[in-house]
Amino acid sequence: MIAFKAICKNPFKSLLIFSSITIAVMAIFLISSVSQGVIGMYSKMIKTDGDIIITQKGISDTFFSNVDISLMDKIDKLEHVSSSYAMIVGASPIGHIPIAGIYGTTANHFSHYKLSSGDYPKEGEVILGENLSKQFKTKSINIANKNFEISGVYRSEIGFEEGGVVMNITDAGRLFNRSASFILVSSSSPNEIDGIVQKISNLESEIEVKTTQNFIKEYNQFKIIENSSFVISFLAFAMGLMGIASVMSMIVNSRKEEFGIMRALGKSRFFIIKNLFFETLAMSLSAYLFALILSLGILALLPHIEMLQGYVNGTLSLATALYVLVSTLFMALLGSLFPAWIASKTDPILLINQGCA
């Protein structure tokens, strides 16, 4: 109760602490969540319909990979292979949109894209993700100086796909001058996946064959995104935490007169530190919860912002939430209790004089 009275007694200082903690917590929530969301969307896109992925050997990014699509004929004949399909992934300006994802796929993969309206594309046609379709009111679009009829609109849980264009792989091959970016293979038996990987590897020397799980773990672009987001979020969070500690320390030092009067009235050091502990704990927890609610709200809105086309998404993990909670409480308590402990050891008369100075 005393802690809440102290918070209400200094509303401006309390608001300053509350705002500092909220901004610091939101910084790491949003930066790390968006980076994990990007990785999660691309990972889900690859893992959805395949156990094995085949790319060009020595290529670090699927955007530059070129695999001979005729390999599918040989792959489909292998024992324990249930299905395979090929994709071309690329990006290009589309009409007035500066950049959007292009997904060229074989006809047996069209069912992955759930139609909201229209039909799956034939040659010279495309279907648009729901987010992208909101940007166009015409019956055709221009992609890389080529005109395509819009045959339908599809929906997807994956933001990348929602803001993209799906077309026949032959049309995508002409646009990007390649046969296939990668081939995905499904196995009829999980126990046979490693054996299928080996058999496919033996078909051609210029391909790299991995399980989709291993591919995602080793994909260089994911490592770059993860490392970059870690550095940026760490710096932002470290600066925020130092700011929290500094603000708490300054505010505690400004209350020396109050502590001196308490000591002069016979209050123990433990009494002062205990009340400051609960005061800081209440402030930190309330700011953390407020930042968490705001961050979750922003992350929920991101996929629905038309100008982002669904490409920016966020996933907040429990581990991140707990890590931020512990770090926030630790720095806030350190910044307040350490100077309070030093002040409580000082002669009350000196504290009162310092506070009045």
Image (cartoon, grey):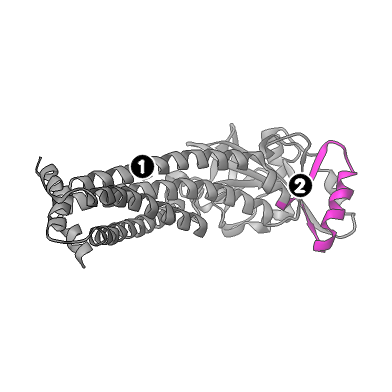
> Residue at the location (12% across, 60% down)?
265
Position of the N terminus by quadrant: bottom left
**Pointer 1: what residue?**
242
Q: Which mark is residue 183?
A: 2
The outermost residue toward the front is 347
User: Over which residues does the magenta segment extend?
Assistant: 185-213
Q: Tag on residue 29?
A: none
Question: 323 and 79: which one is in front?
Answer: 323
Q: Is residue 257 or residue 134 the one in the foreground?
A: 257
| Amino acid on which the number 1 mark rests in the picture | Met
Tell me the element at label 1.
helix
Q: Secondary structure at mark 2?
A: strand
Q: Is residue 356 left or right of residue 28?
A: left
Residue drawn at (43%, 44%) of the image: 307
Q: Position of residue 299 (x, y in %)?
A: 43, 53
8 above or below 124? Answer: below
The residue closer to the viewer here, 212 or 109, is 212
Q: What x and y, as percent, mark residue 91? A: 59, 37
Point out residue 74 in the picture as x, y percentages from the top left corner.
Answer: 89, 48
Q: Which amino acid lies under the numbered mark 2 shown in the image of this protein?
A: Ile
Q: Residues within 10 Å of mark 2 (few under 14, many from 20)?
A: many
How crowded pointer 1 is (Cα within 10 Å; few <14, some 14-19, many 20+) is rated as some
Residue 188 shows up from this direction: no
Q: Is residue 199 magenta?
A: yes
Tell me if residue 342 is in the magenta stretch: no
Res. 276 in view = yes
